[in-house]
Image (cartoon, rainbow, N blue to C red):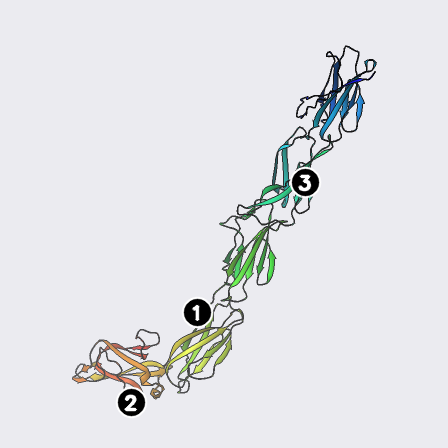
C-alpha cells in the first residue's frame, strides 16, 4: 500500500519574516490530522533559529525531520539551527507516521535579517593633541552597539578601527567659505558575535572646522635709541598676543634675505631713505595652516638731519684774505655712517672734498652772494643728499665818525661820519673794489637828529637807498648834529633788510 503524502506550505508570520504560501496536496489524510511548526530567534544569536513542530493524528505519533534549505538537515520535534548567512530560506518540516504510511510536509519561507544599524552620525574636529591630528567619533543605534567594530577608510588611504579614531594630516586642504573642510570617509561595521560586516555603500562627508589663527598682526616701531635705524617688531594685535584655536603658533620672520624665528625681533636698517619690507608668518605647529603679514620700515634722513653753517673767517688785515669764509657740516652722527662731503662754493672754483665734520676754508676774490652746495654721502644713505644755501660774502661795516667843536657851546655838536668796511677792528680803506655795487643795496635809516648842524647840511637824507660814495674807501658819508642816531644796512640785491644775509651797522 502506498504512503499518503500531504505536502502543505503555510504562511507563518514571525518578526520581519516574509512567507510566501504554497499549497501542494498529493494525498489526503483524515481531517483530524494536522501538522505545523513555529520558530523563534535565538536570544544570543540572530542567525540561530529555534524550531518546534506541532502535529497530531488519529493514526499514530508523528516523527519529524527538517530540511533548512541551506543544505543542512535535522530531526526531532524541537531543534535549533544556525544559518551561516543572512537571507531567505525555505524550511520544510516532514511529519511521518510510519505504521500508517502517512507523510505530511509543511514548508515555510523564513528570513535571517541583516541587523539594523541606524542613526549613524560622524563628527570630526582637530585634536587637543595637535592641530595636525583630526579626531573622529561615530555614533549609531543598534542592538550591537557594545560590540560593533567600526572600520574607517579615508580618501588619502589612511585606515583606522574603533568608535573614536584619529589620523594625522600631512596637509590641510583649503577650506570653504565657512571655514570648514569636507572629509570623505568610508565606514564598515563588523559585529563579531554574528561574524557579520555591515558596509555602508556611500561615503560620509564629514564637516571639520579648520583651525584658525586669531589676533595676528605685525607692528614695528622705532626704538628711539641708538639712532633711527633700529626697529622693534612684534606680532600682537591691539596689544593682544596671537592664539590658535588648536595648537601653538610658530613665527618665522624674513628681513633683507635673513630668516629668524620668534614672536619679537629687532632690525637694524643698513640704509636710510629706503623702504625695507618685513614679513612674518604664523604657522600652527605641525600643520600647513599659516598666515603672513607684511610691514615696511624705513628711516628718513633729510634736510632736518643734515645741514651746514658758514661764517666769515677772522683773518689778518690784508686784501688777499679779506673774503675768507669757513664752513662746517652738521648731521646726525649716530645715524649716518662714514660720511663724505663734496663742497661747491658757487664761484666756479674746484670742489672741496672732505670727510666727517671737517671744517673747510675758502677765499673769494670778490664780495657777493654765492650759492654754496654741500653734497652729503654716507654708507647707509641710498642716495646722496644735497643741501644748498645762499651765502653773503662781505667784509663787515664800520661806522667812523668825527666831531667838530662848537666854539660857542664848547661842546661837540656836529658830526661828520662815514660807513666803511673793516677787518679785525681796523678800517679797510682800500677794499671798495671788493664790492660790486650792482650786487647790493645800501639802506640808511635815522631814528633821531638831522643833517643840519650850525647852518650846514650834507650827507644822506633820511631813509635813502643806494646812495654810494665814489671815494672808494667809504660806502657813504653823513653830516649832522651831535644827536644823530640811525643805521646803515648792506644787503644783496632783492633781499629783505631783515634777512640774515644783510650786514647792519648802527650809530
Q: Nearer the viewer, residue 207 or 360?
A: 207
Identify the disc placed on residue 152. Answer: 3
Task: Write down the quadrant of residue 315 in the picture.
Answer: bottom left
Which badge, 2 or 1, comes first in the chain's sequence? 1
Q: Vertical placement of 147 versus 292: above or below?
A: above
Task: Write down the quadrant of residue 456 in the picture.
Answer: bottom left
Q: Vertical placement of 445 versus 208: above or below?
A: below
SS under mark 2 = loop
The Cα–Cα distance between marks 1 and 3, rounded to whole angstroms, is: 72 Å
- Is residue 421 rendered to the left or right of residue 337? left
The Cα–Cα distance between marks 3 and 2, rounded to whole angstroms, is: 115 Å
Which badge, 1 or 3, comes first in the chain's sequence? 3
The Cα–Cα distance between marks 2 and 1, rounded to whole angstroms, is: 44 Å
Residue behind mark 2: 471
Residue 345 point in image, percent of width and height: 43, 80
Which badge, 3 or 2, comes first in the chain's sequence? 3
Check disc 1: other Cα within 10 Å, few if <14, some if 14-19, many if 20+: few
Q: Nearer the viewer, residue 97 or 28?
A: 28
Q: Closer to us: mark 2 or mark 1? A: 1
Amino acid at each position: 500500500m502506498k504512503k499518503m503524502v500531504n505536502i502543505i506550505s503555510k504562511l507563518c508570520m514571525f518578526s520581519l519574516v516574509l512567507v510566501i504560501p504554497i499549497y501542494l496536496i498529493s494525498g489526503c489524510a483524515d481531517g483530524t490530522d494536522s501538522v505545523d511548526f513555529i520558530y523563534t530567534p535565538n536570544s544570543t544569536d540572530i542567525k540561530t533559529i529555534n524550531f518546534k513542530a506541532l502535529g497530531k493524528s488519529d493514526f499514530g505519533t508523528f516523527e519529524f525531520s527538517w530540511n533548512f534549505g541551506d543544505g543542512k538537515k535535522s530531526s526531532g520535534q524541537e531543534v535549533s539551527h544556525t544559518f551561516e548567512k543572512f537571507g531567505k530560506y525555505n524550511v520544510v518540516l516532514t511529519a511521518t507516521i510510519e505504521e500508517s504510511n502517512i507523510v505530511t510536509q509543511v514548508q515555510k519561507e523564513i528570513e535571517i535579517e541583516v541587523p539594523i544599524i541606524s542613526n549613524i552620525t560622524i563628527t570630526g574636529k582637530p585634536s587637543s593633541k595637535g592641530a595636525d591630528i583630526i579626531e573622529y567619533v561615530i555614533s549609531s543605534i543598534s542592538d550591537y552597539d557594545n560590540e560593533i567594530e567600526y572600520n574607517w577608510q579615508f580618501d588619502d588611504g589612511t585606515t583606522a578601527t574603533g568608535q573614536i579614531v584619529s589620523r594625522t594630516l600631512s596637509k590641510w586642504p583649503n577650506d570653504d567659505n565657512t571655514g570648514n573642510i569636507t572629509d570623505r570617509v568610508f565606514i564598515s561595521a563588523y559585529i563579531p558575535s554574528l561574524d557579520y560586516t555591515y558596509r555602508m555603500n556611500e561615503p560620509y562627508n564629514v564637516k571639520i572646522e579648520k583651525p584658525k589663527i586669531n589676533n595676528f598682526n605685525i607692528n614695528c616701531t622705532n626704538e628711539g635709541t641708538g639712532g633711527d635705524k633700529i626697529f622693534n617688531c612684534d606680532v600682537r594685535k591691539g596689544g593682544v598676543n596671537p592664539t590658535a584655536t588648536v595648537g601653538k603658533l610658530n613665527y618665522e620672520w624674513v628681513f633683507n634675505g635673513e630668516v629668524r624665528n620668534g614672536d619679537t625681533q629687532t632690525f637694524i636698517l643698513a640704509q636710510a631713505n629706503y623702504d625695507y619690507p618685513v614679513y612674518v608668518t604664523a604657522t600652527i605647529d605641525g600643520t600647513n595652516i599659516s598666515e603672513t603679514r607684511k610691514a615696511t620700515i624705513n628711516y628718513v634722513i633729510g634736510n632736518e638731519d643734515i645741514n651746514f653753517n658758514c661764517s666769515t673767517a677772522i683773518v689778518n688785515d690784508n686784501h688777499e684774505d679779506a673774503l675768507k669764509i669757513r664752513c662746517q657740516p652738521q648731521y646726525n652722527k649716530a645715524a649716518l655712517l662714514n660720511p663724505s662731503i663734496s663742497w661747491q662754493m658757487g664761484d666756479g672754483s674746484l670742489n672741496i672734498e672732505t670727510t666727517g665734520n671737517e671744517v673747510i676754508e675758502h677765499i673769494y676774490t670778490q664780495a657777493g652772494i654765492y650759492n654754496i652746495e654741500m653734497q652729503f654721502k654716507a654708507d647707509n644713505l641710498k642716495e646722496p643728499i644735497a643741501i644748498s644755501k645762499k651765502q653773503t660774502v662781505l667784509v663787515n661795516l664800520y661806522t667812523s665818525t668825527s666831531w667838530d667843536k662848537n666854539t660857542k657851546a664848547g661842546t661837540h655838536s656836529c658830526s661828520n661820519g662815514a660807513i666803511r668796511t673793516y677787518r679785525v677792528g681796523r678800517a679797510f680803506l682800500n677794499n671798495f673794489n671788493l664790492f660790486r655795487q650792482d650786487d647790493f643795496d645800501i639802506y640808511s635809516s635815522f631814528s633821531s637828529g638831522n643833517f643840519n648842524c650850525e647852518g650846514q647840511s650834507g650827507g644822506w637824507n633820511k631813509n635813502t637807498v643806494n646812495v654810494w660814495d665814489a671815494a672808494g674807501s667809504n660806502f657813504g658819508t653823513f653830516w649832522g648834529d651831535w644827536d644823530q642816531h640811525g643805521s646803515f644796512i648792506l644787503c644783496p640785491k632783492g633781499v629783505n633788510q631783515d634777512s640774515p644775509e644783510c650786514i647792519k651797522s648802527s650809530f
